[in-house]
Image: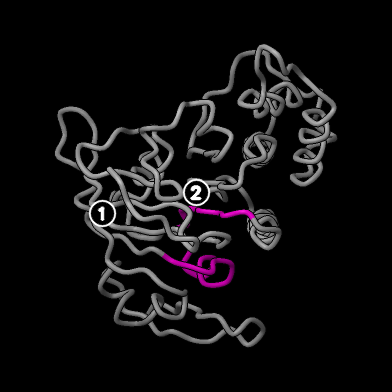
Amino acid sequence: MSHTPSAEIALQAVDLTAGYRSQDPVLRAVAAAVPRGGFTAVIGPNGCGKSTLLRAFTRLLAPASGGVLLDGRDISALRTAALARRMSMLPQQSPVPDGIRVAELVRRGRYPHQTLFAQWSADDEAAVARAMELTRVSGLADRLVDTLSGGQRQRVWIALALAQDTELLLLDEPTTFLDIAHQYETLRLLQSLQAQGRTVVAVLHDLDHAARFATHVVAMRDGRTVASGTPAEILTEERVREVFGLDCRILTDPDTGTPVVLPR
């Protein structure tokens, strides 16, 4: 599949249909574009295909038809290591290897940068240290991951994704298990990474989080893309009703000017 690349689009689903064995397709002819250097929030009701879209974006799930383009090139043409150096993915749940310590797990984010001729380097060590500092897990470096709280463990997984040091960072519900203070801390971290030039894509359930932190929103329902645009364009009373079946009022945050969804 070929496509004319756009300098403004980093990642794109083109007529993408995908699903799992012995099931009907979860995604049906999805068209979705991720602006380069933006913070894209993927929203929609449970079971609409948000996580499946992220899995297809990162080639964890092969399409039945259509495809995914990275800089206008079909990702199926890229070698696994090359793709891992371009994008990192934090899934909803990840199994923790038995007996692994925090620093050791975060170091695994550097595996795509290792080759037979380029082993562990000072750059790798610096990337790991920076990722652990940003996520505030440096003090947990010697702790066993399976002894951590849910919130601590989530921050360690985010550190692993950051250590991979990719231009695209995809996260499936990154605020899961976090209390409200750590939710905002995590979203501010993602916002700062986007401000530094990274492209961030995150599945978010909280519409106010999407409104406040995202620069671009993709709204999904029933395996299809309903609409995409700025938070102000997407988070309207009519669109929230269409996507979620929820009657609401849209207010304006007096501090940020972003939409606030108030269910009726």
Residue drawn at the location 82% of the way across and 28% of the way down: 125
Q: Amino acid at mark 2?
A: Glu
140 or 199: nearer the eye?
Answer: 199
Asked which quadrant contains residue 90, the reply is top right
- Report the side of 60 relative to 215 (left or right): left
Q: Nearer the viewer, residue 36 or 263?
A: 36
Which tag, 1 or 2, sits closer to the chain's start? 1
- Image-based side of 230 in relation to 74, left or right: right
Local crowd size for mark 1, using a 10 Å CA cut-off: few (<14), some (14–19), many (≥20): many
Vertical placement of 241 versus 144: above or below? below
Colouring scheme applied when the structure was drawn: one colour
User: CB of mark 1 within 8 Å of CB of mark 2?
Assistant: no
- What residue range appears in magenta? 198-217
- The spot of residue 186 in percent (x, y) is 66, 53
Q: Amino acid at mark 1?
A: Val
On screen, residue 216 above or below 140: below
Residue 225 screen position, x and y as percent = 28, 61
Q: Residue at 48%, 46% (x, y): give it.
A: 172
Q: Does residue 260 sit above or below 44 in this rendering? A: below
Q: Is residue 248 magenta?
A: no
Which quadrant does the N terminus fall into?
top left
Q: Which residue is mark 1?
A: 30
Q: How many numbered marks does the figure carry?
A: 2
Where does label 2 land, which residue? 173
Quadrant of the rendering where the C terminus is positioned: bottom left
- Name the one closer to the observer, 173 or 42: 42
Quadrant in which residue 86 is drawn: top right
Viewer-side label of 1, 2: 1
Could you tell me which residue is drawn at 81 percent across and 31 percent down?
Answer: 123
Image coordinates of residue 11 in percent, x first then y, are: 44, 51
Q: Secondary structure at mark 2?
A: loop
Residue 134 versus residue 257 in the image, above or below: above
